[in-house]
Image (tube, rainbow, N blue to C red):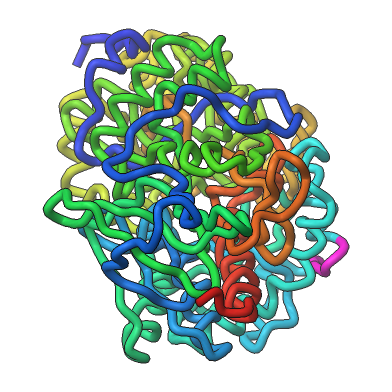
Amino acid sequence: MTETHSFKRRDFVKGLGVAALGAAAMGVAGCAPQGKGAGDEGSSAPASVNLANTGDIEWGRETDVLVVGSGVAGYAAAVSATDNGAEALVCEQYNGAGGASGGCQIFYSWGSTALDLPQKFEGITDDADQMYEAVMACGSNLADPELTRALVDNCADTIDFLVENGCEFEPELKPVEGREGQGAYKTAQAGGAPFALKEVFEGRGGETLLETKMTDFIVDGDSGRVVGAWFEDKKGNPLAIKARRAVVMCTGLWLHDTDMILKEWPTIDQDLLEANTESGSKGIPFGPFMGDHIKAGQRIGANMRHMSYMNSEPYHSTMDLQELVIATEGLTREPDEFHVNLNGVRFYDESKTRGQMAEDIYAQPESTYLVIYDGKWIPGKMLPFATEDDMNNWAEQGYMVKADTFEELAAGMARVWGMDEQVALNTILTYNSYCEAGEDPEFGKPKNFLTPLDTPPYWVSPKQTAHVQMTLGGYDADVDGHVRHVNGENIPGLYAAGLCTGGHFGKDAIMGTYQMTAATFGRLAGIAAAAEEAWA
């Protein structure tokens, strides 16, 4: 083919295909605690009901611990609550459980778990202090040190908790971005953790109410205690659910709430915002993930923090290819990949964290990068998003490049993306020489991740920085999940865990820290909520 494919960002944002599960973009500054918002509306039932003035509510359901959200944080809280003698009920606004955890597999933890899996590389060790320093450094030292220390001290117990409750992990650790080779635990199936916990929870008689959307908290007017919440049931009718001990919020992200994104990130690139809005209409894997539950907390004075921190990551295809339902790579970036820009040159250490990568990619021509890999990756790297037959077809159409020699590969890159053929060839040969020498003098990529191209056929596929992937702020909660009021005191009866909370990450996070944070603090919140004295 002689046609040159130009990937223009303005064209990308016109459509994200059905395989749109990736993300991207920038870290944003701002760490001051943020208080109650004004002008938030939208409830089918009275907000913050004052029981002293309104009399008894006709409760549709009641339980000891009411968990809102069905991801790994929610089910960890529910199982832990039942472990500690409390009845629990999980409510989920969508028609399937799992939330943002439903497609995830990676849990970053240092060792000393019951599984006792070895590190993949010789000479690599890991311990609590190393993990603490890595997590803090990744987030520009803006994470809450107390929360980070609690994460590190409890994460091994969380792995054991998951194993004890039916979660299966692969037999070796997966090296993660942003580290020299220290590994993370990978579940045997995507979404394995929340669904394993769900099975245990429901096997004990626990119940998950799907298509049950929370709209507001119910607060006792005399004590200020959260005693339940208003919901809309499947038919849109108001439903009051009483929480005898506590409500635990595990509602996850709010990355598709355009109003909140613009409020916290007023300078966001318009193309990035448009792509984010479009992806929200697809769900990843469920969603969209809106900020209604954050706003409900603000209405009762719950403090929020780190709201303007938003993590992003490289997308696994380009926007125009997504419109054609072409996902040219699996979702998980490997730290030993080899990337170049549209000029055919390397521009960073490919083993950095996704947020760091996204910022560098965003500065490249057309915010696009190319992944170069060889036959070692095929077909495992692409599955389940593309078979080898799919890739051959895409190469024939000029969306990817396939070649048996480096010379042919560079010629194909020049033909499809218009770069200088000799520059591309020199970049490939130079990178391979770094791999053979075990040292990257240009960008300092750790030697464990310097993997040469040595198994034809060779492939090149385009990727892009596309949209916000993670919102890293939310409820201001302590180690046990107690939510703080804007006045600094705990709100009685209200807990939160997972990605609806702020303070855990700072501006970025190592792969697997999201899941581990959700599972760990969901577990701790469930324990604390079960210990609350019953309200009535």
Q: Position of residue 296 (x, y in %)?
A: 47, 42
Closest to the observer: 531 or 468?
531
7 or 288, which lies in front?
288
From the top left corner, tell me how far across and down residue 330 is, in percent.
37, 47
In the foreground, 155 or 96: 96
What residue is rendered at 47% in x and 46% in y? 48
Residue 126 lies in magenta, yes or no? yes
Quarter residue 108 falls in? bottom right
The residue closer to the viewer here, 536 or 175, is 536
Magenta span: helix, strand or loop, mainly?
loop
**Left or right, 299 with reference to 157:** left
The reply to whether the magenta stretch includes residue 90 is no
Percent position (x, y) of residue 260? 48, 25
Q: Is residue 304 above or below residue 360?
A: below
Q: Is residue 524 left or right of residue 289?
A: right
Residue 129 visible in the snapshot: yes
* Residues in magenta, as a range: 123-129
Q: Position of residue 444 (x, y in %)?
A: 77, 36
27 displayed left or right of 122: left
